[in-house]
Image: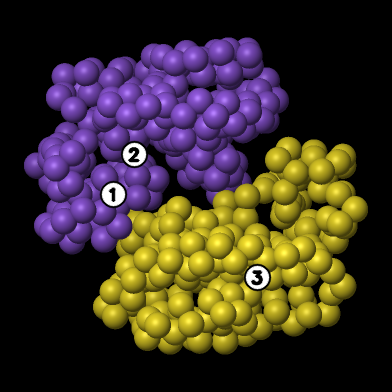
Chain colours: A purple, B yellow
């Protein structure tokens, strides 16, 4: 197979790429990286991603990393396959790009910190820091206030159709909705409906099933 | 004029958009936002950017925010004007996107924190926190180690040509090169040459001149 994703099925960045590949209906090989053994911090992995983070991605001789860049590549290079995740019109695409940047610059920091405290640290036998959880819930709520106003006007963040701007939220959303942070999402009715909608997508459910079938 | 940029000429995100508009040779109206008076945290500015941050951008009836999304729009919508800042080939563009993500996800955090401590806080009469400076210099150096290896193989981050991946670094680079952090850049010879090259671009020099002609 031409497409390979190197990483762990528990990684939010790896799940982001799987979700995109599934939306496009593309086949790929999952190359498991043993992160508990630190394989991502050593060669040969560092030749694929010099920052030592998963995922690393290959499509034939093209080698990429950074999950959001990988997904933009997939969405553009395989524009004619599966579900469209971008727009061809530059003005419509600008709105999608704007909300992709909002996810990366505003939503991701509190969502990733909450996922680390409430999911990853317990998985690794470490203790959750409640002060960080409370602080980051406040930050996340501020971001979701803006999302609530947006989603009152627009079915999806980037416009009328599901796009990468929505998809990039799925991994942390999926983890957090199973924790106390669900209350933060649920305090925003349009956000809550949007979460239920995008989490139910078959492409995403395949990612969840894959994670659930893996050992840590 | 159709294009308007709302913000402060001292803001790194605003300067990023000015640099892109200048590379494209586009005319634009600069609408000054008095950030010391908190104009960005109130209406009518919040209608342009609900997060209350500069810049906000208008091109006719299209309203955007998030500087990196604005620049992607400009580069795509005005692809035939001025200097090309993106690639049409999806595989080449994937490499540009990868390094754009690296800037946003890896370089920007230490660079922006250092700019805040060493430039913005002194401008506002606040004290620099030396512990933050030392910690962030270490983080920046780790990122520049990866850049050094990349720039030993490639003239620019995204490939043979200057692109948005390089341009997005300019505002913090320009500020930091005038501080003690210059030594961190200079410890990386290929990075240092790249900085000198991109800082000398006429489009960037126009941004610097504009800032120097503004009151805070």
Residue toward you, A75 or A139? A139
Dots 3, 1 in contact, CB < 8 A: no
B16 left or right of B76?
Answer: right
Q: Circle 3 sits on which residue?
A: B118
Residue A75 seen in the current view: yes
Q: Is residue B136 above or below residue A159?
A: below
Question: Badge 2 is on which residue?
Answer: A13
* Closer to viewer: mark 3 or mark 1: 3
Labels 3 and 2 share a subunit? no
Q: Label 2 is found on which chain of the structure? A: A
Q: Chain ID for label 3? A: B
Residue at 15%, 48% in the rendered image? A39
Q: Quadrant of the C terminus of chain B?
A: bottom right
Decide: few, some or many residues near mark 3? Use Cα within 10 Å; few <14, some 14-19, many ≥20: many
- Read off the residue under disc 1: A53
Label 1 marks a residue whose chain is A
Classify B92 as above or below A125: below
Mark 1 crowd level (few <14, some 14–19, many ≥20, 10 Å Cα) = many
Q: Nearer the viewer, residue A207 or B78?
A: A207
Residue B64, position as x, y percentages in the image: 68, 47
Whether pointer 1 and pointer 2 mark residues with C-beta atoms closer than 8 Å, the reply is yes
């Amino acid at each position: 197979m031409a497409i390979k994703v190197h990483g762990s099925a528990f990684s939010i960045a790896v799940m982001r790429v799987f979700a995109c590949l599934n939306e496009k209906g593309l086949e790929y090989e999952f190359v498991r990286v043993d992160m508990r053994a630190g394989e991502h911090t050593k060669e040969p992995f560092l030749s694929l991603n010099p920052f030592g983070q998963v995922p690393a991605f290959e499509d034939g001789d093209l080698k990429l990393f950074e999950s959001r860049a990988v997904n933009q590549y997939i969405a553009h290079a395989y524009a004619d396959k599966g579900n469209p995740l971008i727009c061809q019109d530059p003005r419509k695409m600008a709105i999608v790009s704007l909300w992709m940047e909002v996810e990366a610059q505003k939503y991701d920091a509190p969502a990733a910190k909450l996922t680390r405290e409430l999911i990853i640290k317990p998985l690794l036998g470490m203790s959750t820091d409640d002060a960080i959880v409370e602080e980051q819930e406040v930050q996340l709520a501020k971001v979701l206030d803006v999302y609530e106003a947006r989603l009152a006007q627009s079915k999806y963040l980037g416009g009328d159709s599901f796009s990468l701007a929505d998809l990039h939220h799925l991994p942390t959303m999926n983890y957090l909705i199973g924790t106390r942070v669900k209350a933060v999402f649920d305090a925003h009715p349009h956000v809550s409906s949007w979460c239920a909608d995008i989490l139910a997508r078959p492409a995403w459910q395949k990612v969840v099933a894959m994670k659930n079938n893996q050992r840590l």
